Amino acid sequence: MEREIGLWIKAHYGELRPSEKKVADYILEHMEELRTLSIDRLAACCQVSQPTVMRTVRALGYDGYRDFRYAVVEQLAQQGRRKEDGFRAMYGYSLTGEEKTEDIPARIVAATGKMAEEMLKNVSGRIFCKVIETLSRARRVDLYSVENSNVTAQDLLTKLLYLGLDCRHFDDGYHQRISAGNLEKGDAAVGISYSGNSRDTVEAVKMAKRAGASTIVITNFQNSLITHYADFVLCTSQEQAFYGDAIFSRTTQLMLVDMIYMGLLASAFKRYIQSLNRNSRIVRDKEYPVQERTDEKRKRV
C-alpha cells in the first residue's frame, strides 16, 4: 500500500470502533515504536486484546499485523531517505533530482490520472444527484473557502453565475460568518476545504447548518471535521498525502466543479441553456471583435 499511513488512519478513524480507536491513537503517537513492537506488546500498550489489534489493521486494509508493521517500517525508511536526499513526494509522484525536464509533463498527467480514478471511487451517484437537486432548488448559494481552495470556489462561482443561480463567494472569515448566519431554509452553503479542518470554512458551514440552510462539502477526507456539519459530502479521495497538495488538490476539486456544472445542465437543460446563452451575451463585448483581432495579428507580423 503506497500511502501515507498516518493520513490513511486519520481518514478512516471515524469508521473504527471505540476499542479500535485506542489502537489507532497509540499508533499515531508511537509510530517509531512499531519497528520492534510485537502484536501482544502493542495490545498491552493499548490495553486491548490481540483480536482487537487484528481487526484494526484489517479495517485499515492490511491482511495482518505483520503486513502492517512491514508497511510502517518501510515508510519510516523512506522518510529517512527523503530527509537525506532532499526527496519530496507528492501523490503518486516523486522527485529525486535526476529526472529529465522533458519527462515532467507525462509524469504529471499520469499522477493526475491516478487521482481522478481514486476520486471517482469516492463519488456516490446518489449523493451527487442530491447535490445537484439541492443547488438547483436553492434560493441562494453561498460558497466558503480559504487559501488554495479559493481557486476552486471561484471556478464554481463563475459556473453557477453563468447558469443563472444566485451565488456568492466569501473567503474572509468575518464575511463568511455573517453571510452564513443570515442564511435560512431553502438556501444552500458549499464549504470547500482539502483538509476538512480549515477553521474559518468549518465554522461557516457549521453556522449555515444551524441557520437552516442545506450544507454541501467538497473535501479530501470522508471523516474530517467539516463533514460533521454537511448534509452532503463530495470526497475527492481518501489517500492523497499533503506533499504537493497545492498542485494536486485543486485538480480533483476542479473536476468536481465540472461535474456539478454538467450535472446541473443535464438536470434542466432548457432552463440552464437559456441562462447560459443570455449571460454569455452579456460578457461578449469583453472579447475583441473579429476585425480587431485580425488587425492585432497583422501588427505582430
Image: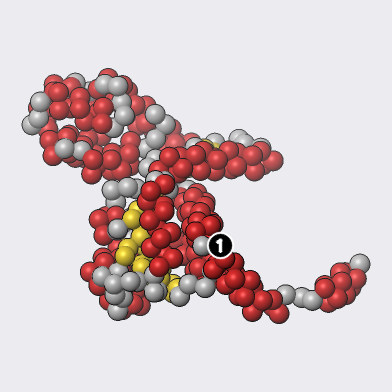
Q: Nearer the viewer, residue 186 or 38?
A: 186
Q: Is residue 173 above or below residue 192?
A: below
Which quarter of the figure has residue 298? bottom right
Residue 211 seen in the current view: yes
Relative to 82, is 285 on the left or the right?
Answer: right
Split into 4 quadrants, where in the image is the N terminus? top left
Relative to 18, is 89 on the left or the right?
Answer: right
Q: Is residue 254 above or below residue 52?
A: below
Q: Nearer the viewer, residue 280 or 220?
A: 280
User: Residue 135, position in %: x, y?
Assistant: 42, 65
Residue linked to disc 1: 269
Q: Helix or strand or loop: what does disc 1 sit on?
A: helix
The residue depicted at 36 percent of the width and 67 percent of the height is 189
Which quarter of the figure has residue 131? bottom left
Residue 41 seen in the current view: no
Which quarter of the figure has residue 208? bottom left
User: Residue 77, position in %: x, y?
Assistant: 38, 29
User: Residue 242, position in %: x, y?
Assistant: 41, 47
The residue depicted at 60 percent of the width and 35 percent of the height is 98
The residue depicted at 82 percent of the width and 73 percent of the height is 290
Q: Nearer the viewer, residue 253 or 9?
A: 253
Q: How many marks?
A: 1
Direction front: furthest residue = 270
The colour mode here is secondary structure
Mark 1, other Cα within 10 Å: few <14 / some 14–19 / many ≥20: few
Relative to 286, is 230 on the left or the right?
Answer: left
The residue depicted at 34 percent of the width and 26 percent of the height is 71
Split into 4 quadrants, where in the image is the C terminus? bottom right
What amino acid is found at the position of numbered circle 1 in the picture?
Phe
